[in-house]
Image (spheres, rainbow, N blue to C red):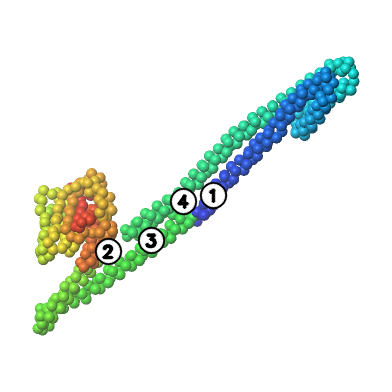
Amino acid sequence: MKRPAQFTIRQKLASGFALMFLSVLIISLYAIIQLNRLDRHINTALAVDSEILKGSESLLNSLLVQASNEKKFIITRDAAFRKLFTDNARECFARLDALAALSHHTETRDLVSAIRISYQRYVDLVNRGFMGSGSSSEKGDGGRQQLLDDTSARIRSLNEAARRALDDKMLSSQKISRRGTRIALFITFFAILCGVAFGFIITRAFYIPLQRLKQGTRDIAQGDFLKKIEISSADEMGEVSASFNQMCDRLRELDQLKADFVSNITHDLKTPLASITEANNLLLEGIGGTISPEQKHLLAIIREDAARLLRLIESIIDLSKMESGLLHYQFIPSDISEVITEAVDSVRLLAESKKIRIAFTPDAGLPRAMIDRAKIVQCLINLLGNAIKFTPGGGSVRVSAGTVDSEQFAVNSTNRATNGYALTAHKRFLEISVADTGVGIPPEDLPRIFDKFYQGRAGVQNRGSGLGLAIVKHIIEDHGGVIRAESADAGGSTFYILLTLADAPA
């Protein structure tokens, strides 16, 4: 079945960034438009309405000054006052021209036009009075005053119209500002939501596949090549997951080839090695004739190395059986004190040869454990052999046993290596510990001491095959137990084994 087409990570990123860019662009364009409208309102208010307001106030003041100069001239007939009146009239007409140029609305244009007509009539009437007799001037006082009042009233109307226009523009500016703020906040909130959604989608697109890859890598590091990563997308992470699964398949094939090779080669080596060992023993017994002491010494070396090689081959065979699930167990309720005593007796001569003291006090009150007795003895011999190997002469090895619960066993420790098995909380188990006063295990080696063929940096001269602890781990795990190791900075190490009690549920 063909997988439906999906966005790639590049397309998802491009779409998200395009959406965010579009949101920012919309906010910016809207802000520019609103700012331009606000700028036009403010400029109009400052450049037109405020100028009309100031011009109307100046015009009204000039009109009052003109009326004063007119009266002074009529009373004193001083030509200076007439000249002042004429100059004021020229300034008033100039202001009216400026106001007419600023007026963009019909109301203000009509008012300015009416003011000009009324004011022109007033100036003409005053000039005729200046040129006539005093009696005629007095007769025209009523007409001049009426024109003066009309002109003043129209100027005040212009002033009020300019003030109203200015107030309207300021109010409109406030409305534009508030509306722009609300819309900008809404668009900003929408952009934030889009950004959060985009971030969630991208995080999900990366985080979940990466978690699966992380778990898959951890499984491979522990030697489990059967688990595969679930492919839920057709993007780049899906391709990486598919490649990872292909790699797991290939590693599983290679691991099987390796296991088959090791199994075959060890069996092929075991037969000629047995023949070599038997021939060597016959020579040592003198079957082939008399041999010198030097020859006996060389043959003894051959016998020891052949025995070491045979043990290594048997360990590889056992480990191969364990990994293939072909190793059989016979689980029976067993007295753990008797099992430990048997293992201690097997290595006691080796410990005495190195002047190392082994301490163990049997406890008949311990509950029985459901174990394969021979396999657990093998595990304890391996642990005791390692403890003796890495403990200098005069040191000691202490073996103890007791019951603990899984919660107590799982208490954090700074220097600990464990096979990672999860235990049921508050369940009782049998714990065996093997502690030595040897060189200890470096902290960087602790996480890998149970790996096949891994040999730490401590005690280089005493290195073995690197299979003993791996075999112990497999046997303990096959018993449903846990093994862990601790090592102090000052030296010495302790191995703990946790086994199921005989009366515990399977």
Amino acid residing under circle 4: Ala
Residue at 25%, 64% (x, y): give it: 457
> From this viewpoint, is residue 483 visible?
no
User: Element under label 1?
Assistant: helix
Q: Point out which mark residue 205 bears.
A: 4
Amino acid residing under circle 1: Phe
**Label 4 – label 1 distance at C-alpha:** 15 Å
Q: In which quarter of the image is residue 243?
A: bottom left
Amino acid residing under circle 2: Tyr
**Label 1 – label 2 distance at C-alpha:** 49 Å
Amino acid residing under circle 3: Cys
In the image, taking residue 440 as reference, residue 108 lies left or right, namely right
* Mark 4 vs mark 1: in front: 1
Q: Name above or below for residue 183 compared with residue 2.
A: above
Q: Point out which mark residue 17 bears.
A: 1
Residue at 40%, 53% (x, y): give it: 212
User: Element under label 3?
Assistant: helix
* Mark 3 vs mark 2: in front: 2
In the image, taking residue 280 as reference, residue 224 lies left or right, namely right
Q: Name the residue under label 3.
A: 248
Q: Name above or below for residue 179 compared with residue 356.
A: above
